[in-house]
Amino acid sequence: MSKQLAKLIVSRGYSLEGLLKRMDEAASGILLSVDDTGALERTITDGDLRRLLLAGVPLNATDLPLIEKKPVVAYSDTPYSSLRTLMKQEGISHIPIVDSMGVPEKLVSISDLTDQILLSTPHMGKDELGFVNQAFETNWIAPLGPNVDAFEQELAEKVGIGHAAAVSSGTAAIHLSLILLGVSAGDKVFCSSLTFVASANPICYQGAEPVFIDSEPESWNMSPKALEQALEDSRKQNTLPKAVIVVNLYGQSADMDAIIEICDRYSVPVIEDAAESLGSTYKGKSSGTLARIGIYSFNGNKIITTSGGGMLISDDDELVERARFLATQARESASWYQHEVVGYNYRMSNILAGVGRGQLRVLDQRVDQRRSVFEMYENSSLGDYVEWMPEASWGRSNRWLTAGLFKTESGVDPQAVIKRLAEHGIEARRVWKPLHLQPLFKSTSFFSHLSSGSVSEDLFNRGICLPSGSSLSAGQVDRVIGYLSEELKSL
Ligand SMILES: *Cc1c(COP(=O)(O)O)cnc(C)c1O
């Protein structure tokens, strides 16, 4: 029995005062009264206790004149859609799920059934507003300021890197990384194919040409084998890339040692797109810190957020200093406005950095929460239909999004499932469509992990991302599992 449920269980013989206290502690508006065998006898609601008080029943009375009513219950195999109908019919807001002996297993509330459940939502801690208020009180309503400096330092310390520059988005951080590595028109840049388009768009900003690299099945991330093939091919044609952008998908690190070892052999620098993997590790090190330059994103859907923002990190202080310079319009040091190169307006605001400082303090919690959401899915019966994204032996994923593949033999179409879940107020998404399949990149080259077809295309065809936010309640995850199981059985 869960702790949450245990809080609701009472037996006969409680005084009115005792029940009121339990009701207050449980804070869910309902108690479950059980007999000697643990079977549910009746539910006691806030309203039941209020009526007793109004009728003048003394607080210490134990033989309570509760109106006899048989509880409305359901069973673990009652479909979620029927639970909702039942609650509407009976005009009740909670329904106990009991086993065959009548012992309560859990309590489903109407809000568990009706609230919109989104894929990944912002989840604030308790310190964010304080830092934002500080910015207001000192009138640091500007890009840059003390929160920005502190956020950079605190993040660098947290992940164990020398230097960090806070910028307006993860995309801006990738763009600056490419400029820092000298990428310009006509150059080639390798990039993971299975990723969000923001990983590759900055390559186009520089007029450079992306070349996409397939995933490996172990981690869904860049295949070292396909990468090596692509580098060897490019060397022969004398078109080695200026940089390789490696993405850590859905919070899981790519096999950075293998990738960096290969790139070192060809003297090509690596940018680690860790937009989704802040808080994860690779062989004990923080994800994002393994390459020459790493980037994080604090967009609203990421594991922690500043509503919009990003960070460029490196152990090379000159690179990071140069990033700050380029991000503030490339203003040279002179007593007038002096400019020698093109600059950008990419710095983070002092207000948003305040949000970031608060969020950084709850990062470890957010990782644990996302991982426990994943575990709920993993421990459910969905495993009959779904293979979960594996966690590679080299690291610990933050499980930013719970992603899985419908087993080939199940023949399930993710699109149909997503549509059905949406009808129940549940947001699910496809796995990223590989960039080499996007019309935007139709004339670019692609190197597969396989001799025919590709791993990333298969992941796209069978993949689904389920609601994974750190603020999801167990009841909400149960509801996703419940509806999804029903739909899968009916398909
Ligand atoms: C979110 C994301 C980005 C872009 O970050 P923004 O802060 O939204 O610009 C880049 N790469 C990946 C893999 C992402 O998931």
Image (cartoon, rainbow, N blue to C red):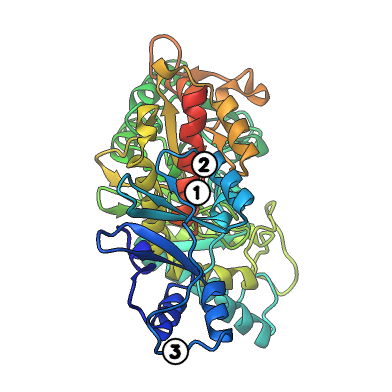
Q: Relative to residue 343, is residue 259 depicted above or below?
A: above
Task: Give the residue drawn at x 55%, y 62%.
Answer: 166
| Discs 1/2, front | 2
Pointer 1 residue: 275
**Amino acid type at mark 3:** Leu
Residue 318: image location, x then y, percent:
47, 59
Residue 384: image location, x then y, percent:
35, 28
Q: Relative to residue 390, is residue 363 depicted above or below?
A: below
Mark seen at residue 59: 3
| Discs 3/2, front | 3
Give the crowd class for mark 1: few <14, some 14-19, many >=20 residues within 10 Å: many
- Foreground residue, 129 or 441? 129
Ligand 1 within 8 Å, label 3 CB: no
* Residue 300 in view, yes or no: yes
Mark seen at residue 80: 2
Residue 267: image location, x then y, percent:
37, 35
Give the crowd class for mark 3: few <14, some 14-19, many >=20 residues within 10 Å: some
**Amino acid type at mark 1:** Ala
Total numbered badges shown on the rendered structure: 3
Quadrant housing residue 234: top left
Point out the tag, 3 or 2, that comes first from the N-terminus. 3
The CA distance from mark 3 to mark 1 is 57 Å
Q: Relative to residue 217, is residue 135 depicted above or below?
A: below
Ligand 1 within 8 Å, label 2 CB: no
